[in-house]
Image (tube, grey):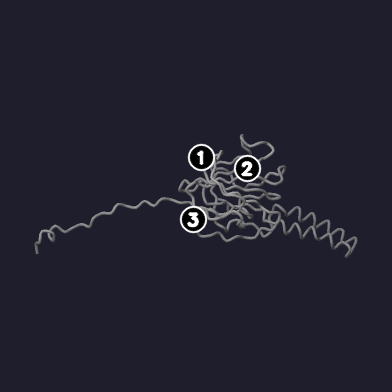
Amino acid sequence: MLAYRYPLIAREGWHWIALAAAIALLLQWQLGWFAVPLWLPVGLLLFLFRDPPRRVPASPLGVVSPVDGRVLSVDTTQDSYLERQAIRITIQMRMTDILSVRSPMEGKVLQQWAGKHDVPASDPRYAQWIQSDEEDDVLLVIVPNLRVVRPKCYVHSGERIGQGQRCGFIYFGGRVEVWVPTGSRIDVNVGNTLQAGSDIIATLVHEKVVPPKVPPKVDSSTASGDH
């Protein structure tokens, strides 16, 4: 299982921030206070690559939002990756949202895809199949806004991952789909605003097995009236 600790500023932006700061510092040394506006890009990069910690809810069967964003749609349709009917929750990231990706649930990553045979080349997507210990299958699909930059993924097939754990990064954001089993309870509505790793979007439902009632054992001596 991944056990990395991430700082408040995502590592994916460190080199960009360092470059912008170096340019601003050099020009300020040459131009003095006239170069102060050049620090604005540094502040903008710090804002875009911010990565604050999130409080993961104590809900083992809960599926948390993998990204910050707004619920675009909730529908039941055919999952072409796992060949099943499933509920698809689509989340649209906004320009000001945090770009880190968090695992929707705890489990084992069984397989990952970069693209799919039935997806046109103009709409590339990346998918990750996670299975819980109870064999619930949850699929995470990412369609990046900027198609030429591939999202980063920090977990490999066969590894375990924790609920709400940081596991990737989407440069410039994108659209994210979470596919859950059809029997799941959906806990969000279209238009809801979500925080990654904290807000539960669905709850996996398991049927409770009720044991048969066993009649109380009767003492034979009492039943026969013996004293």
Alpha carbon of mark 2 to alpha carbon of mark 3: how far?
25 Å
Observer-nearest of 48 and 124: 124
Pick whichever of labels 3 and 1 is earlier in the sequence.
3
The residue sitting at 72% across, 56% down in the picture is: 48
State which mark lies toward you, 1 or 2.
Answer: 1
Instruction: Tell me the residue at 72%/42% (across/down).
Output: 148
For marks 2 and 3 on the same chain, the one whose residue lies earlier in the sequence: 3
Residue bearing mark 3: 60
Q: CA distance from mark 3 to mark 1?
A: 24 Å
Left or right of residue 133: residue 48: right
Circle 3 sits in a helix, a strand or a loop, which is it? loop
- Of the 4 image quadrants, the one containing the C terminus is bottom left
Question: Residue 69, percent across and down?
Answer: 64, 54
Which mark, residue 126?
A: 2
Q: Which element type, helix, strand or loop, lies under badge 2?
A: strand
Frontmost residue, 197 versus 189: 189
